[in-house]
Amino acid sequence: MNDLTLIRKNLFRKKLRAILLTLSILIAFLIFGVLGAFYSVWSSGGALAADNRLITVNRINFTVSMPYAYWNRVAALDGVETVSHASWFGGYYQDPTQFVQTFAVDPETYLEAYAELTMPADQREAFLTTRDCLLVGADLAGQYGWSVGDTIPLLSNIWQKNDGSSSWEFNICAVFDAEDDKVPANYAMFHYDYYNEPLAFNQDQLGWLIINTTDPALNDQVARAVDEMFANSPAETETTTEAAFNEAFANQFGNIALILLFVVGSAFTTILIIVGFTMVTAINERTGEIAVMKTLGFPAPRIFRMVLSESVMLSLFGGLLGLGLAWLMIAAVAPVAAAFLPGLSLPPSVFWVGVGLSVLLGLLTGLVPAINAQRVKIVTALGKQ
Amino acid sequence: MTSLYTLTDLSKGYTRGKESITIFEELTMTIPEGDFMAIMGPSGSGKTTLLNLLGGIDRPTSGSVECQGVRVDKLSEGKLAKWRSQNVGFIFQFYNLMPTLTAAQNVELPLLLTGLSGKQRKERVATALDIVGLADRKGHRPRQLSGGQQQRVAIARAIVADPKVLLCDEPTGDLDRKSADEILETLQLLNKDLGKTIVMVTHDPSAARYARRELHLDKGRFVEQVQEPAQ
């Protein structure tokens, strides 16, 4: 037997109370783990962004297009290594609920700009040379069971052909992936020309430009030069780093960090109050026993440590269970969610912050009971028996 | 006999609101090593307070409590805790065992304050439980034991660290006659065979007869009565 035995025995002396407390802590950390994992995926765009990559969008907002001619004009600027472009196509497969995130791109420059996208060399060549080729991300292909050689129609609610049709036929000639799981492979792309030529409206317009600078130190200079070039034109631009663009895109869904902070903060405050009061009650019930321990010669600081450890152990136990359950849930959901949340997992950083928070919760909830236990007056406590 | 405790001009009082209450004043006495002393007296006479002062769990208003050259009343809280763990075994009226621990674990508790190894602690616990006749109940929790058995576990806990003195506060107050006699016989055995000094507070004259001497505390004064211990 040692102090740990005593702590453990005291912790589980009232099993129902211990189980309910553990459950409440577990739920708080389950919420923390799941939201933390989602936040990590949403905010990973910034981390994945290349530091020399800029995005130029229409100043009104990124859904408004800009003239095709901007592409070549930007390419001529000093400090620009390559420029590519992409346009939002959207589209759905067979049924409007089967949404497919699709872009019309300039194939060669796009693959240069996004060198992290990998595929077999023959498929890469096929994509570059096949006009109606659809280059599909591995997660998206997995979601719909597509493979190279398939011919599929994508329907668009926005883009109609000049023959009145809104169905676009594609030949899947390549599937891309990336070594880093967090690089999205949940979308598809095809030749801009294949999209632009039959368009019934909005021809020769681009969605956004993707600029690779020759040196990240030139980012500000290039961004300024681009925006100044198109100032006072019908389609003014706004150029930012890819990281800032991704972050702004993620924040369309709301300030995720603030939502996370609010939800987790509310859960933790509630748990703090519940566990804190319960610990105070639990220690008050044991005043006599603490007095006996002091009588036997247990020094006050040791009793303080034991009570505090009890609270930390409870919190850590519940916290680890909650984080473990969050990990299991995320692992179960990740394959299903891969199409719209690539790389969904419980990151080590979220796990360790969770562990740290559970220790902090234990210290906060145990502090008052530990001080009370330390201050127990032997004569008074024994006299009450 | 060598003196174990020397109490000099010991006073204890407390205040309740504006009223000052004196429990006893200027008590002077010695307790020899190997003594078995029963302290009797009416409720409120200060018996338990005196026991608390001897055990270092309360401090006098004035005067001194000296135990083998150590001024117990002057020790800091930390040193007092250590002194208690090494020198005093306590036995309470309501046993005060830890309900979550087994008999053996309850007995082992004071040994956690020593540097003994797990094996040594186990041996000591086995010996202590053997002395009180409960070797076969070591795995039982307090609620699985009778009152008399619980008090015997408490005695084992009190003697396991081999203290010089046992302080017993109404050790038979919650027991039937038969169990009380068994407990008192055990205390007598610890005094006679193991040389433990025992100070016992009791209301029960038949319990007091097991002691070597009986002291009556009344109105803050001692009236001593030496007697032959009951057999």
Image (cartoon, coloured by chain):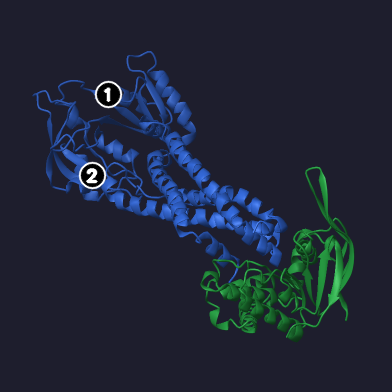
Front position in the image: A31 or A314: A314
Which residue sits at x=15%, y=22%? A200
Disc marking residue A328: none
Task: Give me the residue at 38% from left, 13% from top.
Answer: A232
- Between the residue at mark 1 and the residue at mark 2, the CA separation in whole angstroms equals 29 Å
Q: Indicate which label's residue lies in the foreground, 1 or 2.
A: 2
In this view, B124 is above or below B201: below
Subunit of label 2 = A
Q: Which chain is blue?
A: A
Quarter of the image with the N terminus of chain A is bottom right
A126 or A365: which is nearer to us? Answer: A365
Residue type, label 2: Leu
The x, y position of residue B42, in whole percent, is 77, 63
First in residue order: circle 1 vs circle 2 = 1
Q: Which amino acid is tagged 1?
A: Tyr
Residue A276 or residue A332, whichever sits in front:
A276
Chain B hue? Answer: green
- Residue at x 65% of width, y 76% of height: B180
Question: Which residue carries the number 2 mark?
Answer: A140
